[in-house]
Amino acid sequence: MPRFPYETVDVFTDKPFGGNPLAVFTDAHGLSDAQMQALAAEMNYSETTFVLPPEDPAYDARVRIFHRTAEMPFAGHPNVGTACVLARHGRDRGGVLRFEQMAGLVEIAVERNAAGEVTGAVIAAPQALSLGIELPAEGVAACAGLGAGDIVTTAHKPVQASLGVKFVLAQVGPEALGRAAPDLAAFRKLEGRNPELEGRLSLFLYARDGHAVRARMFAPLAGTWEDPATGSASATLGALLLSLDGGDEAAYTITQGVEMGRPSLLNVTSRRAADGYRSRVGGACAPMFRGEALL
């Protein structure tokens, strides 16, 4: 019976039982697409990764990312967590890992403490900021159980944005963020009325105090009622805020998962590049479990 080893880590935290859990299958050679999807559903985390040999030997791995119901082209905490797991196995090259993914090449810088132990990682999102459709404040508010007046539109309207994976970004007040709760019927209604979303409606709400941000992410249509730490959305938000604020570079600290009892801390740096606005996102990573899937 084939055995497929996996490890789990808590990402964007330095303590067990915080952050965003991730399962990493460190040698997925031999698994079919259907098996990978079934394993991701079985693990029941927001994402699970599968490490395969790279198509180009100049890179370190091909990493496929699945959430409970579909494959993703790119995601933040899966890359940070997978990099930490592989680096603990000595698979980085001078503190750097390069992953082939559907959205493009992802480069990760591994972080170590004075004793040489892997403590975290920082990833560069594979694409520059792109913006999609704007959505009505009342529809977005309904998805989060809020009123249209809770949506702050001073800087921007609720907008679909991406650095490799699409999110709807919407600003709210601090008090509204705390009482937000996903409304599945409202999600279905908003998604159905906007075919430009292409069936993906992941809502990233944030409240801002300068460069300190609190955030929550809801994606119930994809099986994630709430996500404790969303690196790709945080990186996208950083790029959007820099594009709105002006300047060449900015750093943001994003706190997420507090309402879930899984506090997470994400560090985002965004810069204006020749091809647009780009971001890096990083944080700590705590090892949790090891096991095998018997298939």
Image (cartoon, rainbow, N blue to C red):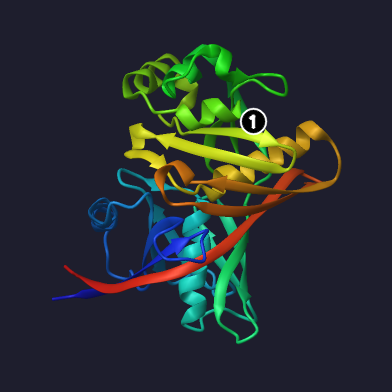
Which residue is painted at 56% across and 18% down in the image? 150
Q: Quadrant of residue 240?
A: top right
Residue 123 seen anywhere in this rendered image of the structure? yes
Relative height, residue 260 to residue 192 (above, below): below
Residue 22: give x, y in percent of width and height: 39, 59
Residue shown at 16%/68% (left/top)? 295
**x and y, in percent, of residue 121 in the image:** 59, 66
Residue 92: quarter of image: bottom right
Residue at the outermost bottom position = 115
Who is closer to the viewer here, 264 or 169? 264
Please tell me whether residue 234 is drawn above or below residue 78 in the rendered image: above
Q: Residue at x 41, y 55 (%)?
A: 65
* Residue carrying label 1: 131
For the residue pair 265 and 186, the one nearer the viewer reads as: 265
Q: Residue 220: horizontal and vertical position, in percent?
A: 35, 33
Name the one closer to the observer, 292 or 147. 147
The N terminus sits in image quarter:
bottom left
* Crowdedness near tag 1: few (<14), some (14–19) or many (≥20) residues, C-alpha within 10 Å: some
Q: Hey, which residue is sitting farthest front in the picture?
A: 175
Residue placed farthest to the left in the image?
Answer: 1
Q: Secondary structure at mark 1?
A: strand
Q: Is residue 53 above or below residue 193?
A: below
Where is residue 234 drawn, in percent x and y? 59, 45
Left/right placement of residue 239 relative to residue 177 reads right
Q: Is residue 240 left or right of residue 90?
A: right
Residue pictured at 59% horizontal, 59% vertical: 105
Which amino acid type corresponds to the residue marked 1 in the rendered image? Leu
In this image, 92 relative to 268: left or right?
Answer: left
